[in-house]
Amino acid sequence: MPVAIVTGASRGLGRALAAGLAARGWDLVLDARRADGLEESAEAVRALGARVVAVPGDVTDPAHRTDLVAAARGLGGLDLLVNNAAVLGAEPLVPLAGHALDGFRTALEVNVVAPLGLVQEALPLLRGAPAGAVVNLSSDAAAEPYRTWGGYGATKAALDQLSAVLAVEEPGLRVWWVDPGSMRTDMLAAAEPAEDLSGTPAPAEVVPVFLRLVEERPASGRYAAAAFLEA
């Protein structure tokens, strides 16, 4: 069975994507900071027949990243790394003039430094896989100047550039950086608590984009979920 690491898998898109991969025969290493929520997610995925290793911890911790890759090695290797874990840096979001610098530093560590660290840790296994791939979660805020989204958007723009360079440096892998669009998640609710999210897609509605990427293996690049599904 192919093996994937999915970070931020206790809720939202990470949990939905883990279920989608499990339903397609993937074994999984799942990460999240909260052990209780992560175990709930892991149990739901195990019910679909997948082998699952749940590794609670903080992706900014190098030892935790080592543990995630070791768990994948224990399942037989690593075919897919999904860097999904992220933080906003401020909740709710605020204009740049009032954005706490400590919050911005935290967002850079979680959203940019940790994904690169996990890629570095995972590269030996990914290079040895028959079809190794990396998915980095982007955002339209990485490319569009939305008011109050400057701090978070800057971290995602940085991750986009890292992804683009990784794709050039590792031509044997597929590297996709994906803008899933707005989703009805706790993160979006925390970012803009006054917004009505009732008409916003649930994470499970976006999962087919990622499954299609993995199965069709298009060229490395940046993909927007809505446009990719329509293509």
Image (spheres, rainbow, N blue to C red):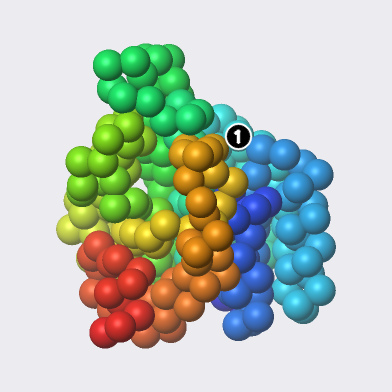
Residue at 65% from the left image edge and 70% from the top image edge: 19
According to the picture, the residue beneath numbered tag 1 turns out to be 58
Location of residue 106 with respect to 123 vertically, above or below:
above
Query: Left of 79 or right of it: where is 67?
Result: right
Give the image location of residue 59, x and y in percent: 55, 37
At mark 1, the secondary structure is loop
**Numbered disc total:** 1
In-image side of 50 versus 201 (left or right): right
Is 107 drawn above or below residue 11 in the view shown? above
Quarter occupied by residue 167: bottom left
Residue 145 position within the rendered picture, expressed as x and y whole percent measured from the top left: 20, 41
Q: Residue at x 40, y 15 (%)?
A: 100
Q: Is residue 163 visible?
A: yes
- Note whether residue 173 is visible: no
Q: In this rendering, would 136 be left or right of 211?
A: left
Q: Report the residue at 50% width, 39% height from top.
A: 194
Quarter occupied by the C terminus: bottom left
* Quadrant position of the N terminus in the picture: bottom right
The percent coordinates of residue 14 (x first, y second) are 57, 57
* Residue 108 placement: quadrant: top left
Q: Which amino acid lies under the numbered mark 1 shown in the image of this protein?
A: Asp
Whole-percent x and y of residue 25?
A: 64, 81
- Work out whether residue 112 or residue 142 is closer to the camera in this orientation and state it: 142
In the foreground, 173 or 149: 149
Q: Residue at x 42, y 43 (%)?
A: 115
Label 1: how many residues lie within 10 Å, few (<14), some (14-19) or many (20+)?
some
